[in-house]
Amino acid sequence: MLNNSKWISYPTKQDYTCPVFKKNFTFSKEIKKATLKITSLGCYYAELNGDRIGDFILAPGWTYYKRTQMQEYDITSMLKSENEIRVTLASGWFNGRINIRTRKELPDVYPALICEIEIIYKDNSRKYIYSDENWECALSKITFSDIYDGESYDATYEEKFIPVKVQDYGEFKIVKQQGEIVKEQEIIFPKSIFKTPKGETVIDFGQNMTGYFEISLDAKKGDKVSFSVAEVLDKDGNFYTENYRSAKAKFDYICANGHQVYKPKLCFWGFRYIRVDKFPCEITKDNIKAIVLHSDIKRTGYLNSSSPLLNKLFSNIIWGQKGNFLDVPTDCPQRDERLGWTGDAQVFIKTASYNYNVEKFFDKWLEDLRLEQQREGRIPFCIPQVHDRPGSSTAVWSDASTICPWQIYLTYANKKILARQFKSMCDYIAEIGRITKEKYLWYGCWHFGDWLGLDAPAGSYKGSSNPDIIATIFYAYSVSLVIKAGKVLGKNVSKYEKLYEKILEKGRERFTEFNTQTECVIALYFDFAKDKKAVADKLANMIIENGKKLKTGFVGTPYLLHALSENGYTELAYDLLLQEEFPSWLYSVKQGATTIWEHWDGVNDKGEFWSRDMNSFNHYAFGSVADWVYGVACGIKTVEEKPGFEEIIIAPKPTKKLKWLSAKIETKYGTVSSAWFNEGGKFRYEITTPSPTTIIIDGKEMRVEKGSYVF
Ligand code: BGC
C-alpha cells in the first residue's frame, strides 16, 4: 500500500511542536473522482483548500507501533482549479509522552506522513500526487501538542516553509483501516460559569466527558486564552487537578486580530470543568462549547427503571464507555495513563457489547493484542504496549486474550475474530504453564490481585484475596474458553479438556477455603467451589455482616451479583445494587457522579478525596454491573450454541424493591426487550424478541417464536 509514496517528515525531530506539510497541485481535465490515501506515524490533521478532509479525529488511530492504519477519503467535491493540501502532524500516541516504549526503542524515528492523491479523469486517464521530496514543511501554529499535556496554538505565528526530509520507514506496515474511527459525537453547552471560593472563574458543563472545546471570541492580536481542565471540585468547591498527576492537560491560545473560532485538533481531555486562567474579556456561555469525542460505535443497549438513582447509574455507565472508547478501550481519559489496560477492557467488555456495537472496535484492538503478544505467549499489561517493559502475564488482565474474543463471539457470532485469535489464546495458556511455580495451578507469580478491593491492607491497591486462588481460577476459566472456542472452530481440544480437569482437581485440592468476598464470588461464578451452597451462604453472610455492602475490587465486582443470584440470593444482589451508602454504585451517584469512579471511595462522605495518585472519576470497570441488569434482572441471555442472539433465553428475576425495570438490546436480528412491572405485589412481564426464545418465568419454561408477549 502507498508503494510509490515516500515517508516524509520535518528535517529535525520535533518532540511536541507540530510540523505542517503542504503541496500545491492543479489538473488539466475534467475529473471523475479524486481520492486521498494517507497515514502517519503520530496523529494527522489534513486539509484541502482550507477545509478539513474527513471526520476522523486523531487519525490514523492507535495501533501496535509497527503497523499503522491507512485512510481513504473521497476528495472529489473539495477540489478547485488550484489546490493546496496541508497535513499537520503531532506525536500523538505514536511517540508523545504517553509512549515510553517508542521514545526509548525508536529515538530516531520522527512523526512522519505518507500519502497519495489519485485523480481519475472523465476520460479514465489518471494523475497521481505522491508524498515525496517535492513537498514542503514548516513548524505550524500548533506550537505544542501532547496527549497528556494539551495544546498551545499561536494564531499570530507565521509559518516558514522548507523542504521536507524523506525517511526510510519501510519497517512500519501500512494496513487498511480496521477499527471504528473517532469522531465528534455531541456538543455540550456550559451549564454555568461561576467563581470558586478561591476566586477562580470556572465553567461547568454538567457532565464529565472526553473531548475538546471550541472557543469563539473577538480579540486583539496577541491576546491570550489559557484553560486548565478538571473532573471534580474539591470539598470547598475549588478547582481540583491533582488526580491528573503529571498530565498538564492545558490549553493555551494566542489570538489573531478580530473574530476567531478555534478548536484543538490533535489532542483531547477528560473533563467536566474548565478553569479560565486567561481570557481577553469576561467569558460568557457564548464563548465556548464542549465537543464529545469517541469511537464511532453505535448505541444498541438501553436500561431504564422506576428509580432515578439507578437511571443515573445507567447513564454514568454509558458516559464511562463513551469517555473510554476512544480508538482503544482505555482505563481513563484524563490523567497520565489513558492506556489500553487489558484488565479493564476484559472486565467491561460484556456490558460494553450490549451498550454499543463494539464488534469492529474490538476487531482492531484484539488484532493488536495478538501482535503485541510476545513470542512466549506473554500478554502485555496494556494494548497497544507503551511501557518499556511489557510486564509478565498476570491473571485477569492477560485473560483479556481469551475472554474478549469469546465475548465478541457470544454477542456478535463473529467466528472470524475467534479463529484469528485462537492461536493467541492457546499461546497464552501455554505461557501460564511455563511460568507457574507449580504445575496445574497458577501459583507463585506476581499479579495485580483484586485491584482496588476494599479489603486491601493499608497503603495497598490490592484487595486481600489470595492472588494464587484468583490466578488458578482464571487459568481454569481461560482454558475452558479455549475448549469452547476450539469446538466452535472444529479443533481437537482434548489436550485442553485434560488440562482443565487437572487444574480443577489440583486447584480444588489446594484451595479449599474462600475467605474474602471476591474469593467466594469467583469460586461460585466459575464453578470452582465444590460445595457451592456453603460458599454462597458464606458470601451472603459476609455481605450481610458488612451492612449489605460490598468489598470487591476489579476481580470480584463484575461477577458479584451473578454469584449471588445464581445461588439463591437474588434479593441480596438487589440490596447491593440499590445500596446508597458507601461503598456502593449509588453512593457515587448520590455524591453527584456523572461517570463511573475508579474507586468506591473516590470521594468519601466528608467530601475528601481518596488519594491524589490513583483517583480517576471516569473509569468504566465497576460499570460492568450493567451486564447483570441486562442479563439477570431483565434476564436477556445469549445462547452459546446460537450466539449473536440468533436464539435467546429471557429469564427475568424481578424484585419488589423496584416498581419496574426494562432492558433493550438491538441485535442484528432486531430488538430484544424485557421489562417487568411490580403491580401490587404481582409482576407483569413485557417481552419482545426477534428470535426463537426460551422464556423462563418463575421456573416455568416456554418456547416462543419471534414476537411480543405479555405475562
Ligand atoms: C489503571 C487501572 C489498571 C491498573 C493495573 C492502573 O493505573 O488505571 O485501571 O488496570 O493500573 O492494575
Image (cartoon, rainbow, N blue to C red):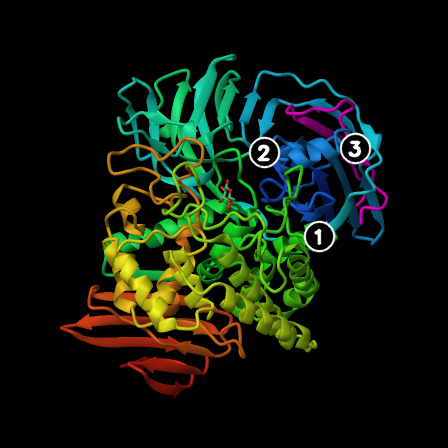
- Whether residue 46 is visible to the viewer of this picture, yes or no, is no
Q: Which residue is mark 1?
A: 371
Tell me the tag on residue 8. Answer: 3
| Left-right relation of 132 to 224 | right
Give residue 350's position: percent from left, percent from top: 48, 61
Q: Amino acid at mark 1?
A: Leu
> Secondary structure of the magenta portion, mostly?
loop
Give residue 245's position: percent from left, percent from top: 47, 29
The stretch in magenta equals 1-29
Q: Tags 2 and 3 in contact by the CB under 8 Å rule?
A: no
User: What residue sits 64% from the left and 64% below the top?
Assistant: 417
* Gap in angstroms between the C-alphas marked 1 and 2: 26 Å
Q: Amino acid at mark 3?
A: Ile
Q: In this rendered view, identify the residue nearer to me: 105 or 71.
A: 105
Q: Tags 3 and 1 in contact by the CB under 8 Å rule?
A: no
Quick check: is the Cβ at mark 1 less than 8 Å away from ligand 1?
Answer: no
Q: Which residue is mark 2?
A: 266
Residue 187: quadrant of the picture: top left
Q: Report helix, strand or loop for mark 3.
A: strand
Tell me the tag on residue 628. Answer: none
Q: Amino acid at mark 2?
A: Leu
- Based on the picture, tell me whether residue 6 belongs to the magenta stretch: yes
Give residue 157's position: percent from left, percent from top: 61, 16
* Gap in angstroms between the C-alphas marked 3 and 1: 26 Å
Residue 355: quadrant of the picture: bottom left
Give residue 248's position: percent from left, percent from top: 50, 25
